[in-house]
């Protein structure tokens, strides 16, 4: 820098300093008022956003060198000795020993005997065979009954099962022998002589047997097939063959399943003669064939099944054919999880009546029955079920239905004649009559688990009937109810109790004969309650003793007209479990 430039710079700095000093020495500025005509409205201009990962434009890019770490370990002496740990002891529950066989034997008053024997044989890991034998009998001695009233009931069943990877097979067969007596003489024979009583052969023997099987398949359109053939006969040369076949198919679709169920039911039988008619025989033969397609939809809360059943009936004896269609609609919806579930629907179908089913319900029927199927045109129902709490469950349902050819038990008439009758022709047996009927039903049920060892249940149902031709809904009660409980005192003692109540039923007394004007007299059978108690004591895993009491209210009620039951019944027995 030359001298001239230095001189100019010095002169500028001196001038600036002089101005600053003079400004400080001047008087302070006066206050002024500034009027803002327009308010300030700042705006935000777009700002440049810096990229999180900028692009490098360096001409030279060097790779990062890997960094390696190493630990310099120096051993340090330690005198710490950890205490040895000890696992907590948990008391294991003793595993329950399961046995493949058991035998039961019991004896009671009325010279009653109860015997059971069940045995299972493991042939292989997938195949099993077993049989079950049961005998129940009593010598009768019912108070006020003059005729023989003992009974026997013996049955033997055998089965063979095979569980394969994708299929299940079961074959079964069995036979039965039952002995009953028509001991219910009407008042018409109240003054009968001892000779008449001693000569009256009122014994009936039922014989029967069946063979059948079931096949079920996993992950297959053909889900299941069930078949059975049953024979029933008696002491009076009656015979019946009943064959059934039921295939089931399932077709999974996009949002629902299509299920198709088939039903083939064939029955053919005969009775040697009619009631008080030596030259009249009865024969029957029916083939019911039906198919029921149904669409099923299920999700978390809603379950719906929409179907229809179509049946064709062939009456071979009368050369008649009928075709019927019945609704098959069911639905349920969870209103409040498991606490409140609403359900309802309309059901219908064709029921094949058989001699076997009738004698199982009422063993005092006469071997002179007219057999025909019952058509359930519809049965509409709706209800609510669920849980009031974790230990209380309930179910309430109402229904209304119509049936054609509803089968009813009705006492056979007594005959005023000196002809030597069969043992069932003294007005002491029952016939079957058919009628078209409408039925209204209201049902309620409550189940309570008081604790882990005590449970109680109560249910009741009310019926209202409307008959078409018959004067009364013979032998059908208006009210049915039951109270039952199970309890377990400890590991050894267990038991239970139940009370069954059946309301009033109606039947009829009728005397016919050449010198008698038939006059049917309606008879009301009183309702009855039956109290039953059982108590058991478990000695060990194999042996236990039990005691059973039945009809403890000591009421010789009439379950059927002129058929009083045994009074207080007691039974003591033991059950023993074992392996062969």
Image (tube, rainbow, N blue to C red):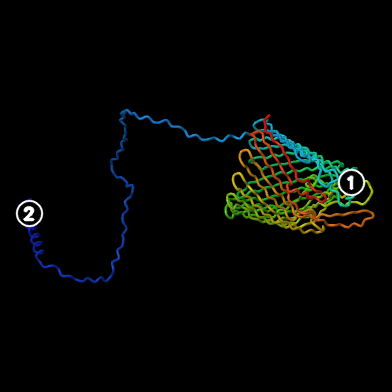
Asked if one can make out residue 576 in the rendered structure from this viewpoint, the answer is: yes
Asked if one can make out residue 157 in the rendered structure from this viewpoint, the answer is: no
Cα distance in 3D space between marks 2 and 1: 156 Å
The x, y position of residue 136, in whole percent, is 76, 39
The residue indicated by pointer 2 is 5
Foreground tag (2 vs 1): 1
Q: Earlier in the sequence, mark 2 or mark 1?
A: 2
The x, y position of residue 288, in whole percent, is 78, 48
Secondary structure of the residue carrying numbered label 1: loop
Q: Please name the residue shown 14% across and 68% down the image.
A: 29
The residue indicated by pointer 1 is 273
In this image, 564 relative to 65: left or right? Answer: right
Using the image, determine if residue 294 lies above or below residue 16: above
In this image, 526 relative to 295: left or right? Answer: right
Q: Please name the residue shown 32% across and 53% down the image.
A: 49
Q: Quadrant of the C terminus?
A: top right
Secondary structure of the residue carrying numbered label 2: helix
In this image, 405 relative to 580: left or right? Answer: right
Using the image, determine if residue 423 lies above or below residue 469: above
Q: Nearer the viewer, residue 255 or 465?
A: 465
Categorize mark 1 by other alpha carbons within 10 Å: few (<14), some (14-19), many (20+).
some
Determine which of the numbered discs, if any, sits on residue 485 in the image: none
- Which quadrant holds residue 462? bottom right
The x, y position of residue 420, in whole percent, is 93, 46
Q: Nearer the viewer, residue 378 or 271?
A: 271
Q: Nearer the viewer, residue 120 or 63?
A: 120
Using the image, determine if residue 108 lies above or below residue 562: above
């Amino acid at each position: 820098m030359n001298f001239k430039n230095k001189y100019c710079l010095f002169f500028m700095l001196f001038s600036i300093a002089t101005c600053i000093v003079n400004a400080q020495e001047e008087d302070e500025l006066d206050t002024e008022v500034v009027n803002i005509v327009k308010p300030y409205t700042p705006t935000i201009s777009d700002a440049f956003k810096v990229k999180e990962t900028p692009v490098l434009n360096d001409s030279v890019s060097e790779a990062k060198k890997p960094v390696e770490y190493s630990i310099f370990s120096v051993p340090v002496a330690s005198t710490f000795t950890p205490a040895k740990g000890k696992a907590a002891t948990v008391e294991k529950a003793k595993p329950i020993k399961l046995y493949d066989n058991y035998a039961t034997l019991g004896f009671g008053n009325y010279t009653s005997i109860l015997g059971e024997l069940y045995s299972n044989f493991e042939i292989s890991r997938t195949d099993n065979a077993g049989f079950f034998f049961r005998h129940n009998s009593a010598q009768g001695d019912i108070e006020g009954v003059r005729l023989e009233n003992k009974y026997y009931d013996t049955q033997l069943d055998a089965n063979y099962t095979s569980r394969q990877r994708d299929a299940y097979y079961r074959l079964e067969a069995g036979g039965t022998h039952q002995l009953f007596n028509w001991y219910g003489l009407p008042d018409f024979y109240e003054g009968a002589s001892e000779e008449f009583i001693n000569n009256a052969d009122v014994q009936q023997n039922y014989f029967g047997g069946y063979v059948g099987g079931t096949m079920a398949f996993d992950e297959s359109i053909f889900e299941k097939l069930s078949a059975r053939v049953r024979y029933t006969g008696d002491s009076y040369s009656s015979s019946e063959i009943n064959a059934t076949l039921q295939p089931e198919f399932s077709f999974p679709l996009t949002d629902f399943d299509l299920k198709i169920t088939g039903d083939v039911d064939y029955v053919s039988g005969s009775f040697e003669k009619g009631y008080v008619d030596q030259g009249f025989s009865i024969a029957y033969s029916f083939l019911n064939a039906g198919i029921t397609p149904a669409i099923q939809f299920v999700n978390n809360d809603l379950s719906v099944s929409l179907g229809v059943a179509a049946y064709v009936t062939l009456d071979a004896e009368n050369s008649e054919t009928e075709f019927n269609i019945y609704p098959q609609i069911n639905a349920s919806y969870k209103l409040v999880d498991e606490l409140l579930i609403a359900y309802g629907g309309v059901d219908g179908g064709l029921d094949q009546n058989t001699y076997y089913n009738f004698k199982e319900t009422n063993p005092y029927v006469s071997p002179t029955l007219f057999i025909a199927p019952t058509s359930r045109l519809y049965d509409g129902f709706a209800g609510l079920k669920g849980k009031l709490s974790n230990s209380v469950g309930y179910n309430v349902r109402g229904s209304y239905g119509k049936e054609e050819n509803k089968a009813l038990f009705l006492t056979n008439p007594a005959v005023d004649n000196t002809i030597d009758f069969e043992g069932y022709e003294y007005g002491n047996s029952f016939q079957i009559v058919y009628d078209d009927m409408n039925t209204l039903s209201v049902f309620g049920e409550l189940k309570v688990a008081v604790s882990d060892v005590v449970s109680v249940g109560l249910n009741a149902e009310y019926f209202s009937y409307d008959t078409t031709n018959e004067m009364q809904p013979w032998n059908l009660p208006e009210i049915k109810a039951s109270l039952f409980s199970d309890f377990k005192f400890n590991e050894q003692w267990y038991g239970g109790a139940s009370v069954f109540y059946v309301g009033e039923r109606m039947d009829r007394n009728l005397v016919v004969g050449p010198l008698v004007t038939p006059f049917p007299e309606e008879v009301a059978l009183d309702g009855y309650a039956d109290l039953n108690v059982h108590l058991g004591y478990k000695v060990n895993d194999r042996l236990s003793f039990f005691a059973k009491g039945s009809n403890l209210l000591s009421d010789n009620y009439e379950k059927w007209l002129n058929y009083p039951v045994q009074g207080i019944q007691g039974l003591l027995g033991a059950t023993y479990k074992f392996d062969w």
